[in-house]
Amino acid sequence: MDYVEIFDTTLRDGEQVPGCKLDSVTKLIIAERLDQLGVDVLEAGFPISSPGDFKAVEDISKLVKNARVCGLTRAVKKDIETAAEALKSAKRSRIHTGIGTSENHIRYKFKSSKDEILERAVAAVKYAKSFVEDVEFYAEDAGRTDNEFLAKVCEAVIKVGATVLNIPDTTGHCLPEEYGAKMKYLKENVSGIHKARLSCHCHNDLGLATANSIAGVQHGARQIECTINGIGERAGNTSLEEVVMILRQHPNLKLDTRINSKKLYGISKLVSESMAMPVQPNKAIVGANAFAHSSGIHQDGVIKKRETYEIIDPRDVGVDKSSIILTARSGRAALAYRAKNIGYELDKLQLDKVYEQFLIMADQKKEIRDKDLPKIIKASNI
Ligand code: KIV
Ligand code: ZN
């Protein structure tokens, strides 16, 4: 097994989302839980952006026991100095600095040239290295940057000591094959690449962030930047719980993370509630329906053997058990199972009668709850 480091950016890229702003106490609570979850790197914020963010990075640096604490900067001296100051109490720290490298960013955002961008990238990494040993460089909009220039920038920043190369698909535009090929190209064409770790940072504008991150690690990247529940700018970032469970479900990839998956559901709820960002019910791994079965055919299969319709044991991600939801689409097996759970053992004849009554009520209600079952059983006159 090779390890893929998990770089959590819930408190930076995630918290950037309008309406998701957290107070300082909640940030500390989430940081502590992320540390217990087992993330390798915790991006705590963008210290220059506001005094509040500076203080959050400073406080998180003092609190976190295991993870490396990271602060974001632009390729700007003042940003880097401020991040270094905010991180100074961290047991292990990282400065995350970088600049846009795509044609679009160079021409319109910076009104600059490739040579100048290269110079600024190198200067930023060199300056960050004067404060901390561990410097991650991001090539913003790498997803739309031509591979040749991207490789040139990566090579130059490795020479001045970058330890991690973040290849963000900032706009979520890449296809998995394309993003994987980008990583492969860098592995094969950047001299000194063995001295740095390649990192995936994918956005979900086309719903491909998770697929792209997995393609990235299949082609040599060894860090994934992600957030709890996939929160983040626009359509969000790669979802932490998804990449962790994909690697666990596919041991043939021979890649794993250090995440304690049993804590995934709890932290998902904490982040969702703290940020008032509901998790869609059909969200993979942590959605309310991720382990709920409502059609008769599926329920019958799951009751006979859970694995028939579930690839993950819910307890592995911190969910108590699978649930059998009673609706008008449910069959006798589900009804008998739920009735038994609350103390009613029904024989075949009794079940037929109760099922008739059940369907009458189920056609009127969206869902039949445990409290409805005694009334249905009584009305069946069994
Ligand atoms: O999406 C992105 O490019 C980023 C960088 C600032 C790392 O979040
Ligand atoms: Zn991002």
Image (spheres, rainbow, N blue to C red):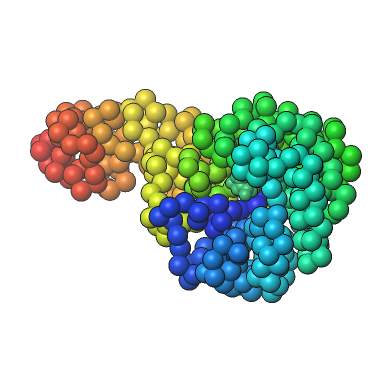
> Percent x, y for residue 357?
14, 32
> Percent x, y for residue 284?
48, 39
Tell me the quarter of the picture where residue 303 sits.
top left
Mark yes or no: residue 41 visible: no
How many labels, in total?
0
Q: Is residue 299 above or below residue 316?
A: above
Q: Residue at x 77, y 45 (%)?
A: 116
The N terminus is located in which quarter? top right
Q: Residue at x 20, y 43 (%)?
A: 373
The C terminus is located in which quarter? top left
> Percent x, y for residue 149?
78, 35
**Foreground pick, 299 / 134:** 134
> Percent x, y for residue 157?
82, 48
Q: Residue at x 60, y 60 (%)?
A: 46
Q: Is residue 221 above or below residue 90?
A: above
Q: Is residue 36 above or below residue 239?
A: below
Residue placed furthest toward the front: 111
In the displayed structure, does residue 271 sit left or right of residue 101?
left
In the displayed structure, does residue 8 sit left or right of residue 276?
right
Mark yes or no: residue 380 visible: yes
